[in-house]
Image (cartoon, rainbow, N blue to C red):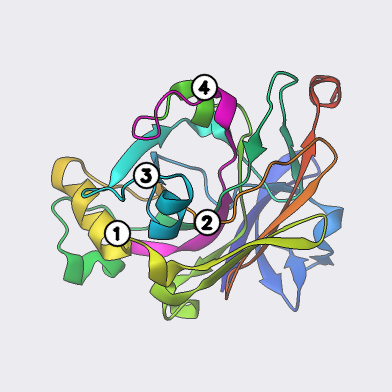
Amino acid sequence: MKHGRIYLNGSVQQVTEQNGKVCLPDGRLLGEKEVQWLPPVKPGTIFALGLNYADHAKELAFKAPEKPLVFLKGRNTVTGHRCVTRRPKDATYMHYECELAVIIGRQGKNIQKENAYNHVAGYTIGNDYAIRDYLENYYRPNLRVKNRDNCTPIGPWLVDTADVPEPGALSLKTYVNGELTQEGSTSDMIFDIPALIAYLSEFMTLNPGDIILTGTPEGLADVKAGDEVVTEIEHIGRLVNTIVDDTTYFGRT
């Protein structure tokens, strides 16, 4: 099943997907463009992986890490399906990052790899935009790169684990204005989902609502204000986002 969150008629509502429509709690069906989307879960701790695909590390001329390269993101960073993300006027290179997002559903500490999937509620799509101009060190991304407001759309749906039988073998694609610009597979992760859950839970408790953004494959490209960016993951869906300039972003009501 696919679960989502929307803002409608002055309140947050939990919805599900039915025949390509948004099914409200009262059974009414709406089109996806008729609602205001929120992230499909209210996020807890947000973990993000850097250089977790060997081809992406090679693309950036970096040696693949020997241990997971993890940094944290604030809740302010996430936004929903069909929302906007700002490209600051001083940015000269801003790129998308299509990522499989793992949603924790059960609390755990010192989780063994063989039990890791028992702690997963489901999966969604993340697009963790980065601005190269702000980057000081790929191994330690600074706050300005990854903690800007609304820099990470996620959604639209949280898809139950039962409906994603092989999360370690999903195709990922990104389209900019309808043109395919990025393509990869979660099978190419350096550290797979069980390894990441085991690693993180060694030193901290994972809780329901925590999100693990598992990294992006090669194929990054600069995006400009006005671009529509679609990130797509097999069995999970399509996440649509539009880039806007400062004037449009700060002029929103």
Distance from Cα at disc 4 to Cα at disc 2: 22 Å
Q: Which mark is residue 62?
A: 3
Instruction: Indicate the amino acid at tag 2.
Output: Glu
Q: Label 3 is placed on what type of residue?
A: Phe
Query: Could you classify mark 1 by the number of other residues whose Cα lies within 10 Å: few (under 14), some (14-19), or many (20 or more)?
Result: many
Give the alpha-carbon distance from disc 2 to disc 1, as whole Å. 16 Å
- Pick the quarter of the image with the C terminus: top right
Would residue 189 be visible to someone looking at this image? yes
Badge 3 or badge 2: first in the primary sequence? 3
- Asked whether 82 or 55 is in front, the reply is 55
The kind of residue on which mark 4 rests is Arg
Of the two numbered discs 1 and 4 on the same chain, state the one appearing first in sequence.
4
Q: Earlier in the sequence, mark 4 or mark 3?
A: 3
Residue 10: % across, % down = 77, 38
- Quadrant of res 79: top right
What is the distance, in whole Å, between disc 3 and disc 2 at their CAs?
Answer: 12 Å
Q: Which is more N-terminal, label 1 or label 2? A: 1
Q: Provide the residue designation for mark 2.
A: 218
Inspect the magenta stretch and tell me whether residue 126 lies in it.
Answer: yes
Label 1 SS:
loop
In the rendered structure, the answer to whether residue 162 lies left or right of residue 131 reads left
* Circle nearer the viewer, 1 or 3: 3
Mark 1 highlights which residue?
Answer: 191
Looking at the rendering, the stretch of residues picked out in magenta corresponds to 119-140
Residue 124: say if magenta. yes
In this figure, which residue is indicated by the disc labeled 4? 144
Horizontally, is 26 left or right of 233 in the view?
right
Residue 56 drawn at (x, y percent): 46, 53
Q: Is residue 145 left or right of residue 51?
A: right
For the residue pair 159 and 56, the one nearer the viewer reads as 56
